[in-house]
Image (cartoon, rainbow, N blue to C red):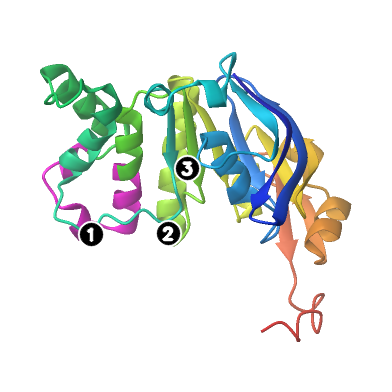
Amino acid sequence: MLSIQNITAGYDDKTVLHDITATVQAGQFIGIIGPNGSGKTTLLRIISGILKPLRGKIVFEGRELEKISRRELTRKMACLPQDVSIDLSFTVRQVTLMGRYPHLSRFGPHTQKDFDIAEQAMALADVSELAGRLITEISGGERQRALIAMCLAQQPTLLLLDEPTSHLDIGHQLSVLGLLSRLNRQNELAVIAVFHDLNLACEYCQKLMLLNRGRLEAFGSPQEVVSKDMIERVYETEVVVQENPRSGRPHIVISAEENKGKFDKIG
């Protein structure tokens, strides 16, 4: 579905990513992890076509990304940035309908088909009961699900998310990630998401891309990527990596005592 081929990218005279190569299959749930400044968001922007690479190319569904029009691309690829600001008085239904814009004819109104697809998207995202509520008056977790509904209304084959659980409490984190996991399995929707929480990434993702200083350090299953030696080397933090007794996935334990004094100079 998606081929990342020798991508080097950056901003102005600063190179952020160096020679990144990876392949994502249809229907996979991929997590992008790595320390702050490692290039996670930059890679997501390259995949979405928002940022052009300095070298290399992205191939999406058999075609080079730069040869796909933005309108056509947004019919197949949906992107949810980390901080989406919708502060106007839109209802959840109106926000969801925004996802239909790539499918509208020029200057054309929404059709009954668009309304039906929006209703289906809200049902999939479990926000149907919030359809008439203002987006500014619902909880953070509900708001995130509503934004996912907007993305689903695009009817994409690939969903990109930048830290989809940031600023959410643990209950809402599990709600949002459970939704994404269900959509990934039942609708064969490919998902690529940036994570800061390594344990959540291990629990929900089929494969992880570990970035370190702009380079792809590892790409594989959570069991292949998240080892004590790897995490300590990349994050420069002492950890214990155990097996989650419920899921069998890696679980990272940190100790303030073990890392005491290491970061005293930060800040």
Kindly check if marks 1 and 3 are in contact, taking CB atoms under 8 A apart as contact: no
Relative to 104, does residue 172 appear above or below in the rendering? below
From the image, tell me which residue sits under label 1: 87
Residue nearer the viewer, 154 or 230? 154
Query: Which stretch appears magenta?
Result: 128-146
Tally of marks: 3
N-term mark: 1 or 3: 1
Mark sitting earlier along the chain (2/3): 2
Label 3 residue SS = helix
Q: Nearer the viewer, mark 1 or mark 2?
A: 1
Q: Nearer the viewer, residue 155 or 133?
A: 155
Q: Is residue 133 magenta?
A: yes
Label 1 vs label 3, nearer the camera = 1
Residue 209 horizontal side relative to residue 192, left or right: right
**What residue is shown with label 3?**
177
User: Which amino acid, mark 1?
Assistant: Asp
- Chief secondary structure of the magenta portion: helix
Where disc 1 sits, the SS reads loop
CA gap, disc 2 and disc 3? 11 Å
**Mark closer to the chain start, 1 or 2:** 1
Q: Is residue 202 left or right of residue 73?
A: right
Q: Quadrant of residue 60?
A: top right
Q: Residue at left 49%, top 43%? A: 161
